[in-house]
Amino acid sequence: MADQHESVSLSPPQADRATSAGHSWFPGPPPPMYSCTLTPELVAKAREELQEKPEWRLRDVQALRDMILKEHPNLRTRLDDAFLLRFLRARKFDYDRALQLLLNYHAGRKTWPEVFQDLKPSTVKHVLDLGFLTVLPRPDPNGRYILFLRPGKWKPNDYPFVDNVRALYLTLEKLIQPEETQVNGLVILADYTGVGMSQASNPGPFLAKKIVSILQDGFPIRIKAVNIINEPRIFKGIFAIIKPFLKEKMAERYVLHGSDLRSLHRNIPPSVLPEEYGGTAGRLDMSAWSRLLLDCEEEFVVEFCQPDPLEGVVLPDSMLCEGEQAGGREEDGFRALRSQLYYCY
């Protein structure tokens, strides 16, 4: 069994303590050997919400590892405790669902190579410099980090939209490293100031569905709320295209605030928001998260710039994004999107 384990396992990225020290507001990468970093309060929360029992934790990890080795022996995936725990927690320690999530996670790389090929922070520096996304330095009172997006900062002539997806994916990969994020989940805040027809229609329904598929069914993270602020009238058309791809529970987590900061503050307290949004956490700094990601370049090279993890693995068609077989249906969907957006505009 040891030889088989070595043949399929990829080494986890090593924790860089020097890098972590330079970004003390965000936890550093986990150590090579797993050691639980959860507080007693988070251990209790994980037990109640995720069915995670500390006394069974490593047994459950081993059970998932055994399933991978038995059912997918050619899958080149990390098998270390910390990595597999992400998938168990995301699926409340249901072995079968955790395994499916892991396969979906790797299948995303297979079906969307333009996102995952040579995926590292230096290749999306232009996205980070533009201020398309960041992570606010203070988590909310529930311990959830806030992923802050500004779609209006991107213009179709700047660069391909897929670069935004690459930056988003790298950010999620970094956010999911700390165990507290795995337990608490995260919150998304999106400011739609400046979003018009060109941004809304450029990705198209095909791309929108692939993004939702990866975030909803192909990544081990719990998105607890999506707050939309300063959304234009056109957002009705955008959401009309996205909503059919969302699970009911996720769709219910979208909250539209318009320009009402009081409404936003009922969901995200001013204590963690920047001054630009009526908060008391100082001026918005888009550069801190950019520096953190760029300092982790080597870590992402190890994680993503490797041979195809699914080489030699046969996956059922149901695991591929529907667009891989959609053909002309993408164009039909795009026309429907533009019609909807013009109506709302």
Image: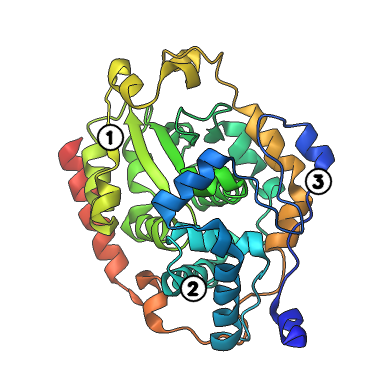
- Local packing at callout 1 (Cα closer than 10 Å; few below 14, some 14-19, many 20+) is some
For residue 257, side relative to residue 121 (left or right): left
Q: CA distance from mark 3 to mark 2?
A: 29 Å
For residue 18, side relative to residue 67 (left or right): right
Instruction: Assign a secondary structure to mark 3.
Output: loop
Q: Which mark is first along the chain, 2 or 3?
A: 3
- Local packing at callout 2 (Cα closer than 10 Å; few below 14, some 14-19, many 20+) is many
User: Residue 310: x and y, percent?
Assistant: 59, 79
Which of the 4 image quarters holds residue 34?
Answer: bottom right
- Local packing at callout 3 (Cα closer than 10 Å; few below 14, some 14-19, many 20+) is some
Tell me the residue that label 3 is attached to: 16
Q: Residue at x 33, y 47 (%)?
A: 201
Q: Which one is nearer the viewer's eye here, 291 or 238?
A: 291
Instruction: Assign a secondary structure to mark 1.
Output: strand
Looking at the image, is 148 positioned above or below residue 222? above
For residue 296, side relative to residue 174 (left or right): right
- Nearer to us: label 2 or label 1: 2
Q: Which mark is first along the chain, 1 or 2?
A: 2
Which of the 4 image quarters holds residue 78?
Answer: bottom right
Looking at the image, is 292 positioned above or below residue 208? above
Q: CA distance from mark 3 to mark 1?
A: 37 Å
For residue 124, side relative to residue 185 (left or right): right
Q: Which mark is residue 99?
A: 2
Q: Which mark is residue 255?
A: 1
